[in-house]
Amino acid sequence: MDWAVPRLLSGLCWSCFGWLDNRTETARCPRCCRFGRVDGDGLCRPCVIAVREEIQAGFEAVFPAATQLHLYVPGLGLRSAWNLPRPRGAADPYLGPRKARQLVDDPRICPAVVRGQQTLFPVRRRFERSDALRISARTWPEEPILQVLAEQRAATKGLSASWSNMVMRLVRCALAIRDAEGEAVVAPEMLDQVRLPLKAAAAEILAQAGMLRPRMAPSPAPWPVRSCADCGCWGITKARCRGCAEWRQKPGRYPPGKCPRCRRDGLPLHADEDLCRACLAYVRESGLETTKQSFSQLAFAGPLAHQLKRRPGELGFVVHNQSGPLMRARARAREAAARESGTAKSAPVAPGQTTLFSMPRKWPRDQILDRAELAVQAQELLHEFTADYPQVWVTDKHSVPGSATVVLHTLLARLGPHTPIPERDVRSLADTVAAGPAATRRVISFLSEHALLEPDELPETPGQLLADVRRPAMPRVRDLDQERRERHDARALSAQITRLPEPMADQLHAWVRVMRGHGRYQHPPADFRRIRRYLYVASPALTSWARAGQDLRQITADHVQVELARHQGNVARGLLSVLRSIFRALKQERVIFHNPTAGMRLPAGTHLPLPLSSDRLAGALDRLDGPAARLIVGLVAIHAVRAVEVARLDLADADLSRRTLAVHRGEHIHVVYLDDLSTHLVADWLRERRLRWPQATNSHLLITSQSYRHPASPQLSYCALQAAFDQIGLLPRQVWADRILYEAQQSADPVHLVHLFGIHPGVAVKYVQTAHPDKALPPIR
């Protein structure tokens, strides 16, 4: 009945549409006498709204009566058709005018005592909302001040007046408890006795008024600790522990019934053992002879509770000869009998068998053949894979070598050692047996070494194209990820160049050949990822020239200046660098006759290094956890070794007998002479490295638990380096620059900086001029 409201195609507003959707009873409304959908009181939606407004206005509802037409005003919303108000415990709604609540003061609620009187027996009260209403007429001299503070806080936080009323209700209860205790101020323990919300806000207001003393007893637990309703384990805060809750959620697998052992009814029972979870766990740990007993040992919740599956040695657990393993053996016997009765199982691939349709395999749990017999060739491969690991590691399926052995054993038993195994099948099986990425990489690298791997193609991921191109580590074995990435980048680069018209595409192919080191002159080859990044930067300019019908022979310096004018700062300088690389390569190959970027320069801003305050560096090594983090930060902060160079260090680079450290910088080696502190840092890390990973095969100085036996022997990742500096709140670049700047302030000699840190002379001059601007020399012309 609202006018000017947006309507649906059915002619109803959204509110009436929801009313019809949620109400199924159709009857005559006793107020407007119309047939329609009614609520539990027998009223339609317009009459419910009208009756509520009449009650709020102080009038008594009349039946029958006319319904006033409502006007919909945009921005004010529609009226809500809530249920009519009912007195507590009444079945019929109250249709009379709203009565004002009378203020009362019950003297039996927290009667005041003489202030300072000692309490003989402390009483812990439980103040409810109903108790607060029974002292609504009680007053205190401090109440006006607290009321003003509550209103000011509500106005500051943008809260309504109801918030201040709720806080003052809690404050009034606390004041009543204070008077009953004979105290002068309110204690935080008194607020804990009130079962009302906003205790923290009430405590802040009382503290602001100087009426709150410090807490003398610990605060009560937010959730009471109880026992599980099903298994009885103690130490949880919910009705049931996690295991019993999962059993309750699966009535099809664990049907409810009466446990024949503990004789409790309504518990979920195991389908095979016909026992509840508490009795089943107790029988599996105590033995089958406890099946005839009706009691169970009381246990704590969590890892100390009776477990349906516990590994030997955990919490001193010793496997009983008639406990869980025997019952699981009986279950395996039943499964084997079921499989022999008619369940078909896939057979291993025969030697020489070809694949009709190549598709990803799914590995269910019953196809994990970690104990199956292998052929002679497969057994030799498995023995070669496990030869470098201790037998204890191989038998432990939760370790990296153990899980990798399970994956390789299943692959050889299922697919055989005769044909290459798809990489997607290796990763799918690794996910089934919960093998980590380290175990998966070891299996993939081992199969690749023996020509038994069919590698997958690399999918394109966002953000990889503009990622920084870092110097790759020299792998000890073939890096499959790098090869797959190279193939993917080569195809993507060729496809991107092919989309350009001729002869520009042929000219760019010639540039790619030069970048790959196959030009007229010998150059160090660049990887396809770097070439793709260069082409990505130059793609807008190349596309603009191609649309104008021009190739790279027709480009002049004016065309380059027009493209550079569209960008600013580092973007323009990066574009000029890429275009200079393209035109230089084409002129070298005699594809063009003139380099339009020759002699072209762009202004670049000079960023002066900034020193760090002494309080940020003081005690930095003491705030680091672990010798690896202290070594990384120490080499950067003491000897100005770059963080990426620290990650590339090998074990052979550290010579503690001569107290030197060899830092490789291209074809040049910079020798760092270690002081006493640096020598101790290196020695501490080598000792830690030998204790944690005595069988490490990675020759890098800094290794982790993921890379110490990695087949490719990768260097330390940048995230691991950054984690060390995150502990002191600094960046590696800031620490490196501060060390060089401090030395420049002390010596003012760029030659000394070059010999000490092995940096470029131009960088050394820049730091000296920053440290001593009064000694800066004019540029040499």
Image: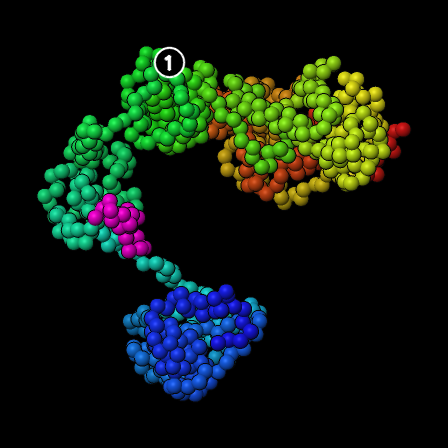
5 relative position to 348: left or right: right
Q: Who's the residue at 29% across and 43% down the image?
A: 303
Q: Which residues are magenta?
A: 235-255
Q: Nearer the viewer, residue 702 or 485?
A: 485
Q: Amino acid at mark 1?
A: Gly
Q: Is residue 213 above or below residue 689?
A: below
Percent coordinates x, y for residue 76 in the rendering:
55, 73
Magenta run includes residue 251:
yes
Q: Is residue 643 visible?
A: yes
| Residue indicated by mark 1 | 352
Dot 1: element = loop
Q: How is the image coloured?
A: rainbow
Percent coordinates x, y for residue 674 in the rendering:
61, 25
User: Residue 604 appears in which quarter of the rendering?
Assistant: top right
Q: Is residue 499 above or below residue 30?
A: above
Q: Is residue 206 above or below residue 135?
A: above
